[in-house]
Image: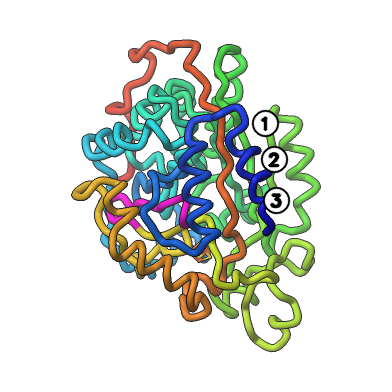
Amino acid sequence: MGFLSKARTAYRMSKGRPKGWQSLLWNTAMARTGRVGPLMTPVHVAIEPTNACNAQCPVCETGNFTMRRRKGLLDFKAYRTLIDEIAPTTTTLMYYFMGEPFLNKHSYDMIRYARDRGIYVETCTNGDLADAQGVIYSDINKISFQLGGMDEETHRRYRVRSSLAKTHANLHALIDLRRRNPQSNVQVDVGFIVMRHNEHQVPAFLKWAKEIGADSANVIDPCARNMLEAHAYLPKDRKYWFYDEEAFERGVLKPKHLPDNECQWIWNSIQINWDGEAVPCCRDPNGLHPLGNVFEHGLRGVFNSKKAREFRQQVLDNQGAIEICKLCSSYGLPTLEKPRPIEFEIQRHSFDPEKLELPTV
Ligand code: SF4
């Protein structure tokens, strides 16, 4: 990239000076010039409310029981300290990783805590446990209900042990409550994980999403971890694939575009597990690349730790040897979401997480 082009990018980033622009600019410049630190606190943080789940999706380490990490729930006190640390520069919090977020009964309060501190928050859910009052109270910016099919049979082929009827009931209750609270800005997204057993239902899904009043609908290209899963679950229609078709015919699973000693994402983002252990990104569900514990050393310390720098250096020098990068096709830059002030209040008495009946983790 030439000097003028770099200057244009820097100008675009700093225009309007949204929160986090200095961090995004600095960390991206470090990535592009091949420096692994020191970095500023990342603008995008992902955190795991729990790695337990009520469903048993077969293409998921939690669901198929191959998760090597201990199961547990994110602690509210430790979470609050973390949010206080990152709030000045972090613009986006992905409140989700390897489990069902709403199995953590503090989820609604946790999301609200981050929202109160000007952080844009998103999550995804299988929908079985999402409580409409709790979601509106949390003031989350975006919640995505992700379905495995358009009827119980197809839904449960992937979302094993989940109930489409429950998901629908919770989704309808949320859309209805949002309609009755027009000041709420909670955006409701519906996602359809397109697979071999449900690809014929995509048009029905898109029609249904409009009819129920969802704000957005997403047809989600499926992931597979290996060829066995690919043969079992990838749709026949290859327009839904991000995998290399020619390599697939040779028995190799790899994305169409493989990163080549580059990943600006990990200069601007970090993934935190429920117990505070951080890993580079969501491609590391088993904690193969531990960077340090943010509850013990703070996020800035871990983001600049020896292990974090060494991992980035390996990405720059020999990314081909990093297993988790071999199935990754997404390594761009996070966007700077604009913080939106809370303009309404739903009284706490309208929602009590203690009364939620949750399965034991
Ligand atoms: S898996 Fe993807 S996002 Fe993670 S470090 Fe590798 S290229 Fe970056």
Question: Residues at badges 3 and 2 in contact (C-beta under 8 Å)?
Answer: no
Type of residue at label 3?
A: Ser
Determine whether, in the image, residue 258 is placed left or right of residue 278: right
Residue 53 in view here: no
Q: Nearer the viewer, residue 59 or 290?
A: 290
Determine whether, in the image, residue 149 is placed left or right of residue 246: left
**Nearer the viewer's eye, disc 3 or disc 2?**
3
Name the residue carrying label 1. Answer: 214
Range of residues picked out in magenta: 266-278
Q: Nearer the viewer, residue 25 or 143?
A: 25
Question: Residues at badges 2 and 1 in contact (C-beta under 8 Å)?
Answer: yes
Q: Residue at x 70, y 58 (%)?
A: 198
Q: Quadrant of residue 306?
A: bottom left
The answer to if 268 sits in the magenta stretch is yes
Q: Quadrant of residue 67?
A: bottom left
Under circle 2, the secondary element is strand
Q: CA distance from mark 2 to mark 1?
A: 7 Å
Name the residue carrying label 3. Answer: 5
Name the residue carrying label 2. Answer: 217
Q: Is mark 1 within 8 Å of ligand 1?
A: no
Of label 3 and label 2, which has the lower sequence position? 3
